[in-house]
Image (tube, rainbow, N blue to C red):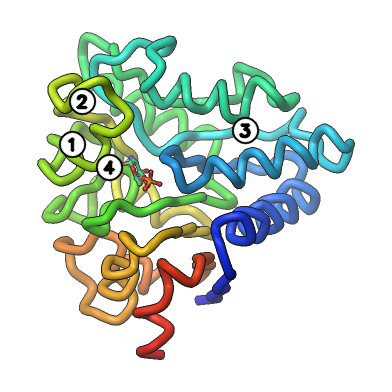
């Protein structure tokens, strides 16, 4: 595993963008696995700036996103489809038909999971999977206790995740209770994984994921077993790990 510790969030975003940039330049028809949340916002901003400077071309890129809330329409301002459009896709030359996010409004959620697995299989394997991490060590929406061998599936969100994500909604009651997420098996099939972390509230999870046992109780700990992981984090998120290594 390669580890980069940066001074702050902006430097973390630039480093993560460097790694994504290299992927797009070296393989213009790469499949990118993309993530949402506050962590990658700066990374997408950086990539958009590089695209606007003429340094990047997404015309042949395909993307598959990790997850989506159940019940939110694509134009709901907290849906992950909306997040991707307004933080990234609307500002680059990726083709709409090459961008994939699970459909949280599907009437048959199981069928939607199967469809999404098929989309990933057709497009994949994912060349570079960008990940953030929840405070409880979740990746995508794979919550503690979810088993490692799942592909895309429906999850009940942990109370701590609902609470953490309530900041984006008018009230905690509005946070969806379920989501569709790529499973750990799907995530682990990516050729390379880039995990980005920022802020003191992730420090314990980073420490547990990379110095503790590999266990479904800390979903990100599975990354210890992936052959090509890059961890990029600012000092606040990384200090407990750095102390120990
Ligand atoms: C959500 C997303 C995850 C993300 C996590 C952390 O639960 N499903 O993919 O990594 O939030 O979000 P943030 O980066 O805002 O801390």
Quadrant in the picture for residue 199: bottom left
Residue 122 shown left or right of residue 14 in the figure = left
Disc nearer the start of the sequence (2/3): 3
Name the residue that disc number 4 marks. 141
Query: Mark 3, mark 1: which one is toward the viewer?
Result: 1
Under circle 3, the secondary element is strand
Disc nearer the start of the sequence (4/1): 4
Do the CB atoms of the residues marked 3 and 1 lie less than 8 Å apart? Answer: no
- What percent of the width, then of the height, locates residue 171? 19, 23
Residue 139 shown left or right of residue 228 in the figure = left
- What percent of the width, then of the height, locates residue 48? 72, 35
Do the CB atoms of the residues marked 1 and 2 lie less than 8 Å apart? Answer: yes
Q: Residue at x 39, y 51 (%)?
A: 187
Q: How many residues crowd around disc 3 within 10 Å: few (fewer than 14), some, or many (20 or more)?
A: many
**217 lies above or below 3:** above
**Marks 2 and 3, how far apart in space?**
29 Å
Q: How many residues crowd around disc 1 within 10 Å: few (fewer than 14), some, or many (20 or more)?
A: some
**Marks 4 and 3, how far apart in space?**
21 Å
Disc nearer the start of the sequence (3/1): 3
Disc nearer the start of the sequence (4/3): 3
- What percent of the width, then of the height, locates residue 165? 27, 36
Q: Residue at x 46, y 35 (%)?
A: 65
Name the residue that disc number 2 marks. 175
**Marks 1 and 2, how far apart in space?**
6 Å
Under circle 4, the secondary element is loop
Under circle 2, the secondary element is loop
Name the residue that disc number 3 marks. 62
**Marks 4 and 2, how far apart in space?**
14 Å
Residue 34 shown left or right of residue 54 in the figure = left
């Amino acid at each position: 595993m390669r580890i980069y510790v940066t001074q702050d969030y902006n430097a973390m975003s630039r480093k993560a963008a460097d790694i994504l940039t290299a992927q797009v330049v070296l393989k213009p028809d790469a499949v990118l696995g993309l993530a949402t949340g506050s962590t990658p916002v700066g990374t997408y901003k950086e990539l958009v700036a590089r695209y606007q400077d003429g340094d990047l071309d997404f015309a042949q890129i395909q993307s598959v996103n990790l997850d989506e809330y159940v019940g939110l329409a694509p134009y709901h301002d907290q849906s992950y489809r909306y997040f991707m459009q307004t933080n990234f896709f609307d500002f680059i030359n990726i083709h709409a038909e090459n961008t994939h996010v699970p459909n949280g409004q599907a009437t048959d959620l199981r069928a939607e999971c199967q469809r999404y697995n098929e989309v990933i299989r057709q497009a994949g394997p994912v060349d570079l999977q960008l990940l953030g991490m929840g405070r409880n060590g979740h990746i995508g929406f794979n919550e503690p206790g979810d088993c490692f061998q799942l592909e895309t599936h429906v999850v009940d969100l942990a109370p701590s995740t609902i609470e953490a994500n309530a900041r984006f909604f008018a009230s905690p009651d509005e946070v969806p209770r379920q989501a569709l997420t790529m499973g750990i098996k799907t995530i682990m099939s990516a050729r390379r994984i880039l995990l980005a972390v920022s802020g003191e509230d992730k420090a314990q999870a980073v420490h547990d994921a990379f110095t503790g046992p590999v266990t479904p109780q800390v979903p990100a700990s599975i990354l210890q077993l992936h052959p090509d992981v890059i961890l990029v984090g600012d000092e606040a998120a990384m200090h407990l790990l750095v102390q120990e290594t």
